């Protein structure tokens, strides 16, 4: 289906309301009223079997009776009637249907069947669906919803998976000063979901900011592909709820248990440049500031206040959010000193003191940003202006006139400072309400308290980092060509064996196919084979291979320091005898593994790392790295990245996020570890798990990192029970 | 001075306003107007040399002219006139003075002198001072400030170090629904500070909650003594700002550099049961909820909502704050199932769905809390009611009547649920404003969004833990009797030597005085002494002792594995020669330390810990423990406690906060370490640093913890340059 199909929802030439009603209080009445009252300029066709006319508009018994073409049909009829009418719509050539009606997938049983049926019909007749089970669809050309208020028009696009949240947020917005280019209630997302609309709205000139309330994302792959492009065009802010419910991740591996239930969403949002809102308040505060204020060129702000206390509170909040206070040039400091009262604080935060009239705010703002009074030329050389944004604080003191101050501040900003990021905090309520509203109405965000201001400015800085990144795709994406055929054969053998956990020598073989170094490991099935293998391995540790024997040491299933073929043969016999004697009765013994012994002491420096992968249903493999060894789960010094488009840069960054990275670099005169080699393992690991979706979990713990090279000592690979059709994400 | 002195500020029989004025716009005019308009029932004496009468009240030229007694004098005259008038007040027998006038310590120079003078006069004449440089003093009997609005009366006591913050917060409160028992502007705190008022207000029946905005606490010791008692009586909420400025802590030790600039305040507040607000919003939200709602008996809450989305958002917020959703009994679940619509979600969070009339809210609330309709007896057996509080969410959907819902909810709560903690979140603005205000006016906090509700409920749970603690003072406070005379002698010697950093053998001696085990260490000053000492030590490491030689290895200043007297003598000569040859020219060599070599390998299990102390100006020694060794500063796995009233319980708790504690307990079949011994060291360390305030920093890194016992291998002690008069905090 084409993008143009979606555009029909925004600009329909005609709308049919199926179930339109003239009875007050009915949903079908609310919808047609909303369509009419929103000054829709196209044609409206009420469809109702009982009425000839609704609210003065000719009604039709059936959609097929309408003599002209219909672009969009809005459904407000009981769920049991929906399916046949959808088919009618299809035959009539309707382009898009908005199903407000509930009683589909969300109720289970027959509801699921109904939803499947309409999906199938929509495909058959090339229609797109919004809903079912939604509040409707509101855009600049019409209000096709049963919301009992039409939002103000503006440049925020709002997408919500919950109708009630949309209602609440609309109501909230009516008390604020911003408006919407559209309000889309996704409902059950039978067809169109958030990604579809994000893709469309990224190109929509009426939309400057996109905000979403989502409870799930169905197609992670498409999200990862589409959203980054959209996020480069405009800010996308998402409140993703349901975090606390997502905890049911399988955790048979270290990586699985260390991966938070919400990690995948965090990683995906970060990768895509999505701004994550943690509350409804965030959603709106972020939307407002991105809508009205330019992104700061640098993390370098001024605070201007008419009182010391709030200045300190703001400074704390700035420090908390990682915002930096700019240092003023000597010239600016002199100008401030010479013109402000003696009690004023001229260093950032600037305290223009309690009796400050509006003019003093204007003076301070102009001075700090180097504005010349008469011709708006800068007083300063460009390079002396180190301030790229400001928080202007007002407390209503005895001599303060908040409303007049608001006007003066606004005028100064709109005249001189369109390219700087300016927000205000007027602290109080009764006295400053008018001033605050004036600022908000004039595109200057104004918060009750300074910490909200710091919170939104920090988000702007984060976005500035994303926007600065040059290209959308990492340029250095290298595909590592593993010996996939050999890996396939190993996995097939494990499947035939009805196992999901690979044996040690199998994991080593797979790693060899991808060029990841692990201690040489071979399986001997007889004492004779053991004799033959040992010389190829050298000094070795021998371990019983049996899926049923987990604690090998306890049953005498391990022998250390085997250095001759004879010892190997003897150890084989001894191990098998021990296991038969002390192991579980049903233990199936495959043989004995002969593994190269890693001599730690030969190494100048050894750092234990953990590397691993767990798989997210939506966003695919999540790669992990961090402090390894037996304490890995306690240290929890790990970081994560999506394996989707995983670049060398990504690998470096994720490693740098761990404290272990400091140890790898070398502390107190230690030599640095072979970090390049570790990064190489991460990249190969990512390739492996992308090539083989049947690998559901993977742990390397420890991977020993040396001054030169490394060894993946202990590897655990778990595969899915059923075969998964290989599809690569990269 | 007595507490009763403070009470005069709250209940004066007479007030003189020094600098009262009849001119509008003058501060002296605002103050007298405020006093009169606040319906003060005592006598008012305006003092002004130029007027005979002010606002209809007879004025006096001087305070000495007033024929009757004066309890309180409020100063609004220029700063240069303040000192002589303070003396007049003293002679007149005034009990308390409120100095609004600025121009004292805050301007430096003569201001400091003026402030010192009034402090001295106040002492001389037994007067107490509020201010100078403040907004004034407001309490239920009068408004003695120049605030341009008188706050509502209520039960919140508000103390602010910043007049402007007080102004802003007063203004904010006027738009809200709560009032104040007093609003105190501390100004420069020349005499009375926050602790004085907290102590008084804890006993004040008009006050239910105390909130403070503070930038500093001057007398940490008194704070630690007074505030815990007050916090047991009523919630004390403090917004302490200036966090970002406090960073200038000396950091020559590990402990110093690991201790955050704000750690001491955090520890002190926690120890005292103070609720820390992180924003102005917190301050008010916390005050409101403590004022109106009972503390929940258990962390077990219900969420009732008329829409799924906000329920999920709330559940996330609860999970985020560590709040627990209660599990309903089968009977409750059945009752809900049988009476709510089929689409309703009956498990917690309970979704009573979008068309819910107010009656359905009432039904759900009553059912969950087991309320019988007719006689307010519970339907359930007490033990089946597992829910101790609730968040009730409303979104304004098509059929919702928010105002009516608010009334129904309020009525139900006030009738049946006075002992449960109930808060609401009405999401939106325009439609729900009236309902939200109604709830707030009726003592039910109602938030715009659910996350604020979760935030305040979490704070209530935290307070419930504090209130549950049985006694104010730890019962098991043991004082360890160190050999203080010996320690004094060592410190004296170091001082005489003009050093601040102790040499290794000195630290070991000090530790011996307090029964803390360190490797035996003795100083040899000649090769002969080395010979004599070695047999007493056993297998030893020898190190040059010279304050100037820091990197001992680099200059050949260390010899390992010395096991005979002869080797010791030889090593002595070799080391001294090496140091003379390769060390700095000015190096003063004290001799060579002979230290017992710790044989790690003999130990079954060794865990490296760091223990230390850094000293806070206000709150005294801060004890630290955590993961030690060369990576201590990178792992940053440490926790802190104030040494003030440091109990075994405190020591255990601080250790349990570190991840290292898990290692000490033994992981994967390891034996547990000797945790008792480690705790003993913490207690002794605390005693040592309390006995000797001249110890400014102390590090033990590592302290090796064994399965049995420990060894404090490397100790660093720094003492202050000047002698500090020993005063113990315990």
Image (cartoon, coloured by chain):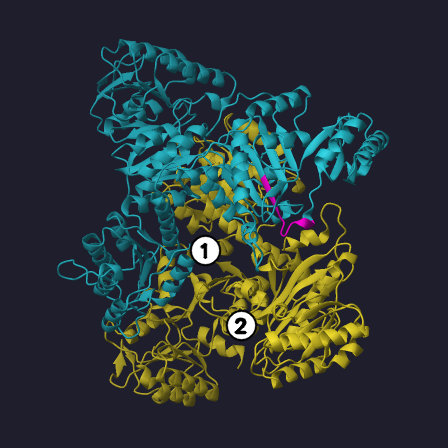
Chain colours: A cyan, B yellow
Q: Nearer the viewer, mark 2 or mark 1?
A: 2
Task: Decide if residue B421 is on the left or right side of residue B73.
Answer: right
Q: The disc numbered 2 marks a residue on which chain? A: B
Q: Which mark is residue B282?
A: 1
First-in-chain label (2 vs 1) = 1
* Residue B707 visible to the viewer: no
Q: Residue at x 42, y 90 (%)?
A: B91
B572 left or right of A396 in image: right
Around disc 2, counting alpha carbons within 10 Å, would you say few (fewer than 14), some (14 to 19), or many (20 or more)?
some
Q: Dot 1 lies on which element? A: helix
Q: Report whether B625 appears left or right of A202.
A: right
List x then y, in percent, for residue A516: 58, 36
Evaluate whether label 2 is on the same chain as label 1: yes
The one nearer the camera, B221 or B261, is B261
- Return the x and y of residue B313 as percentages of the image width and height: 47, 39
Residue A59 shows in this picture: yes
Residue under label 2, please give it.
B618
What kind of element bears circle 2? loop
What segment is highlighted magenta in the picture? A601-611
Closest to the observer: B80 or B3? B80
């Amino acid at each position: 289906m084409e993008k143009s199909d979606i555009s029909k929802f925004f600009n329909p030439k005609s709308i049919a309301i199926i179930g339109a009603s003239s009875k007050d209080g009915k949903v079908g009445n609310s919808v047609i009223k909303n369509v009419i009252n929103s000054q829709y300029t196209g044609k409206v066709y009420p469809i109702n079997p009982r009425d000839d006319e609704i609210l003065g508009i000719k009604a039709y018994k059936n959609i097929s009776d309408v003599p002209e073409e219909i672009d969009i049909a809005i459904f407000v009829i009981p769920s049991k009637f929906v399916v046949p009418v959808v088919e009618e719509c299809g035959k009539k050539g309707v382009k898009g249907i908005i199903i407000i009606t509930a009683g589909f997938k969300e109720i289970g049983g027959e509801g699921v069947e109904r939803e499947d049926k309409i999906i199938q019909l929509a495909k058959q007749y090339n229609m797109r669906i919004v809903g079912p089970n939604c509040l409707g669809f509101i855009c600049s050309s019409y209000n096709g919803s049963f919301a009992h208020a039409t939002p103000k028009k503006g440049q925020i696009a709002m997408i919500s998976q919950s109708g009630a949240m949309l209602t609440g947020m609309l109501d909230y917005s009516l008390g604020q000063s911003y408006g919407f280019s559209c309000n889309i209630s996704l409902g059950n997302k039978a067809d169109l979901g958030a990604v579809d609309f994000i893709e469309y709205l990224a190109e929509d000139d009426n939309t400057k900011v996109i905000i979403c309330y989502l409870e799930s994302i169905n197609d992670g792959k498409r999200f990862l592909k589409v959203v980054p492009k959209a996020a480069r065009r405009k800010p996308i802010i998402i409140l993703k709820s349901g975090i606390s419910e997502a905890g049911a991740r399988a955790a048979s591996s270290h990586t699985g248990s260390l991966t938070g239930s919400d990690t995948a969403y965090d990683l995906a949002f970060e990768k895509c440049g999505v701004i994550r809102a943690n509350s409804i308040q965030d959603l709106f505060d972020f939307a407002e500031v991105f809508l009205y204020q330019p992104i700061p060129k640098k993390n370098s702000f001024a605070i201007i206040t008419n009182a010391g206390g709030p200045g300190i509170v703001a400074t704390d909040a700035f420090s908390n959010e990682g915002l930096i206070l700019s240092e003023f040039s000597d010239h600016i400091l002199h100008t401030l000193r010479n013109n402000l009262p003696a009690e004023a604080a001229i260093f950032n935060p600037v305290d223009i003191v309690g009796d400050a009239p509006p003019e003093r705010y204007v003076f301070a703002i102009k001075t700090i940003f180097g504005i010349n009074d008469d011709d708006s030329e800068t007083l300063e050389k460009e390079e002396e202006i180190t301030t790229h944004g400001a928080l202007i604080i007002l407390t209503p003191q005895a001599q303060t006139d908040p409303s007049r101050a608001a006007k003066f501040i606004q005028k100064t900003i709109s005249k001189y400072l369109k390219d700087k990021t300016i927000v205000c905090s007027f602290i109080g309520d009764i006295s400053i309400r008018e001033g605050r509203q004036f600022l908000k109405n004039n595109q200057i965000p104004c918060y009750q308290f300074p910490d909200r201001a710091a919170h939104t400015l920090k988000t702007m800085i984060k976005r500035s980092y994303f926007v600065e990144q040059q290209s959308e795709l990492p340029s250095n994406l290298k595909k590592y060509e593993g010996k996939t055929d050999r890996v396939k054969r190993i996995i097939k053998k494990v499947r035939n064996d009805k196992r999901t956990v690979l044996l040690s020598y199998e994991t080593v073989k797979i790693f060899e196919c991808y060029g990841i170094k692990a201690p040489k490991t071979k399986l001997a099935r007889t004492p004779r084979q053991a004799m033959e293998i040992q010389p190829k391995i050298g000094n070795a540790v021998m371990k019983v291979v049996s899926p049923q024997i987990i604690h090998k040491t306890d049953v005498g299933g391990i022998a250390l320091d085997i250095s001759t073929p004879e010892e190997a043969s003897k150890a084989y016999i001894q191990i098998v005898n021990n296991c038969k004697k002390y192991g579980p009765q049903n233990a199936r013994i495959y043989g004995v593994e002969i593994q190269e012994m890693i001599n730690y002491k030969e190494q100048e420096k050894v750092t234990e790392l953990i590397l691993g992968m767990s798989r997210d249903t939506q966003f695919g493999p999540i790669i992990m790295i961090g402090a390894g060894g037996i304490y890995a789960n306690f240290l929890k010094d790990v970081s994560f990245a999506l394996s989707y488009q995983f670049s060398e840069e990504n690998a470096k960054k994720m490693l740098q996020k761990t404290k272990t990275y400091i140890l790898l670099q070398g502390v107190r005169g230690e030599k640095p570890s072979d970090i390049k080699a570790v990064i190489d393992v991460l990249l190969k690991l990512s390739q492996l798990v992308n090539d083989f979706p049947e690998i559901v979990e993977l742990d390397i713990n420890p991977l020993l990192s040396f001054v030169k090279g490394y060894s993946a000592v202990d590897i655990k690979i778990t595969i899915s029970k059923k075969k998964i059709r290989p599809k690569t994400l990269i």
